[in-house]
Image: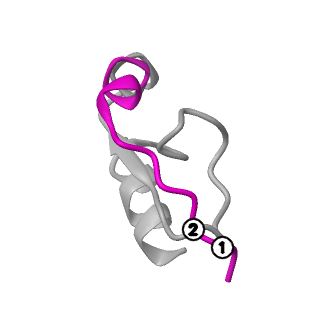
């Protein structure tokens, strides 16, 4: 949660690696400079479904 806050305060866009809304109970986060960049990067990633904490 702290990493998400620090990134957003610095102007970053954070989301789930699949491009959806960030769920802090998941173990993955995608942090980019913009929502558009996240949309371009997300399809290139290998998505792994981890159980919620």
Residue placed under numbered mark 2 in the picture: 50
Assess disc 2: are there few (<14), some (14-19) or many (≥20) residues with their C-alpha within 10 Å of its C-alpha: few
Q: Is residue 3 magenta?
A: no
Percent x, y for residue 12? Answer: 37, 42
Q: Residue at x 33, y 51 (%)?
A: 10
Q: SS of the residue at dot 2? A: loop
Image quarter (top left, top right, bottom left or bottom right) of the N terminus:
bottom right
**Camera-side residue of 12 and 17:** 17
Q: Is residue 50 above or below residue 10?
A: below
User: What secondary structure prevails in the magenta region?
Assistant: loop
Estimate how packed mark 1 is, as few (under 14), some (14 to 19) or many (20 or more) residues with alpha carbons within 10 Å.
few
Q: Are marks 1 and 2 in contact (CB under 8 Å)?
A: yes
- 30 to 38, vertically: above or below: below
> Residue beneath label 1, please?
51
Instruction: Examine the structure image and report whether residue 47 is included in the region drawn in magenta.
Output: yes
Q: Residue furthest bottom?
A: 53
Residue bounds of the magenta highlight: 39-53
């Amino acid at each position: 949660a702290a990493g998400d806050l620090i990134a957003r305060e610095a102007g970053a866009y954070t989301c789930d690696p699949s491009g959806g809304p960030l769920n802090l109970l998941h173990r993955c986060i995608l942090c980019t400079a913009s929502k558009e960049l996240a949309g371009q990067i997300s399809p290139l990633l290998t998505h792994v479904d981890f159980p919620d904490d």
